[in-house]
Amino acid sequence: AELLELLAKDTHETLSIQSSPISPVSDRQIGDALKAEAFVAHFQPKISCLTGGLVGFECLARWPQPDGSMIPPDQFICFAEQKGLIDALTRQVYDYALANLPLCNLRNQLKYALNLSPINLKDATFPHWLRNKCCEHNVKPSQIILEVTETASMENPLVLLEHLTQFRIYGFQLSIDDFGVGYSSLVQLARLPFSELKVDQMFVKTLASSKESQKIVTAVVGLGKSLGLNVVAEGVEDVSALGLLQDLGCDEAQGYFIGRPMDRVSAGNWNGLSGLS
Ligand code: C2E
Ligand code: CA
Ligand code: CA
Ligand code: CA
């Protein structure tokens, strides 16, 4: 059921994209796709709750198929992690994203969020590699936000702290992703060098309909603000959720109501949320 929901979700991404048949992905297929440099990224807009203006994009991995469909990341990231291919995959997706950022006037002011696998955090050479990539593509490290899941931040705190700190020293920003659904990590949140908190979409999607979600989001936004973090809500699917987030003082919003993940051309032409005052 989860897979079907996922496929349905991606079918709607753009009109030209069709869901691919559900078949387990082999490491051989991922290896071949890596050799062919097949992996790409799509870009989902993120807006300021205060002004409604575009603040940046989250870059999301995609695997295009010969029939024009796209395999979504939940169908290959975990296999790549298991088969020791995630280092190569992450570098390929980042390289694509940085070389193909949406073309728009604000290019040099926007922020670009990239997702990190927990395994990437064990690789001591990665921060330096990323710094060089940014330099190569004329992107300032301060424009890059690395999204790390809450669960990932629980393992091996000392090595984690060292590698996260290295990213910060280079000027990258760090975001704790999917906050609220993993292990309780309030201590980590305060002690690790994060600059942003992303409220998990599970709570945001149900914001308008569930009192419980409203209470959780209120608390999490308040927590993030009191720690001085930039607070982002993702999974904004309707106007009422966006209104509530604005009332709560949430900084930024992302979700299907605002814009779906898009290829670089559509993302470059994206001109805001119509009807938002
Ligand atoms: P995530 O980082 O939590 O990214 C948000 C996911 O929610 C994306 O799914 C996005 O398309 C979807 N989404 C955004 N707004 C809405 C909304 O309003 N409603 C609903 N129902 N969904 C929304 P996607 O692109 O399929 O990515 C799934 C997950 O795969 C990501 O979750 C992230 O954990 C992982 N991922 C994506 N790209 C990469 C990558 O380059 N590297 C790694 N390691 N993981 C990635
Ligand atoms: Ca993310
Ligand atoms: Ca998330
Ligand atoms: Ca997620």
Image (cartoon, rainbow, N blue to C red):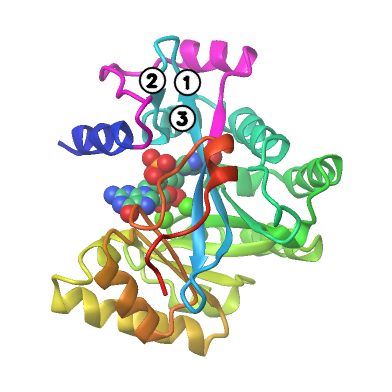
Residue 69, numbered label: 2
Q: Quadrant of residue 179?
A: bottom left
Give whichever of 102, 76 is nearer the camera: 102
Mark 3 to mark 1 CA distance (whole Å):
21 Å
In the displayed structure image, the side of residue 134 where residue 58 appears, left or right: left
Sequence order check: which comes first, mark 2 or mark 3?
Answer: 2
Mark 1 to mark 2 CA distance (whole Å):
6 Å
Magenta residues, start to end = 13-41
Sequence order check: which comes first, mark 3 or mark 1?
Answer: 1
Residue 64, numbered label: 1
Residue highlighted by disc 3: 82
**Which quarter holds ligand 3?**
bottom left
Residue 160 showing in the rendered view: yes
Residue type at mark 1 is: Pro
Sequence order check: which comes first, mark 1 or mark 2?
Answer: 1
Give me the residue at 37% from left, 66% from top: 275
On whether ligand 1 comes within 8 Å of the CB at mark 2, the answer is: no
Q: Looking at the picture, how far across and down is residue 153, in whole percent? A: 51, 60
Q: Are marks 1 and 2 in contact (CB under 8 Å)?
A: yes
Q: Is residue 26 magenta?
A: yes
Mark 2 to mark 3 CA distance (whole Å):
24 Å
Q: In the image, is residue 132 above or below residue 223?
A: above
Viewport quadrant of the C terminus: bottom left
Q: Looking at the picture, how far across and down is residue 260, in whole percent? A: 40, 46
Q: Is residue 257 magenta?
A: no
Residue 166 showing in the rendered view: no
Q: Quadrant of residue 246?
A: bottom left
Give whichever of 113, 269 is nearer the camera: 269
Residue type at mark 3 is: Gln
Q: In the image, is residue 106 above or below residue 6?
A: below
Dominant secondary structure (helix, strand or loop) of the stretch shown in magenta: loop
Element type at mark 2:
loop
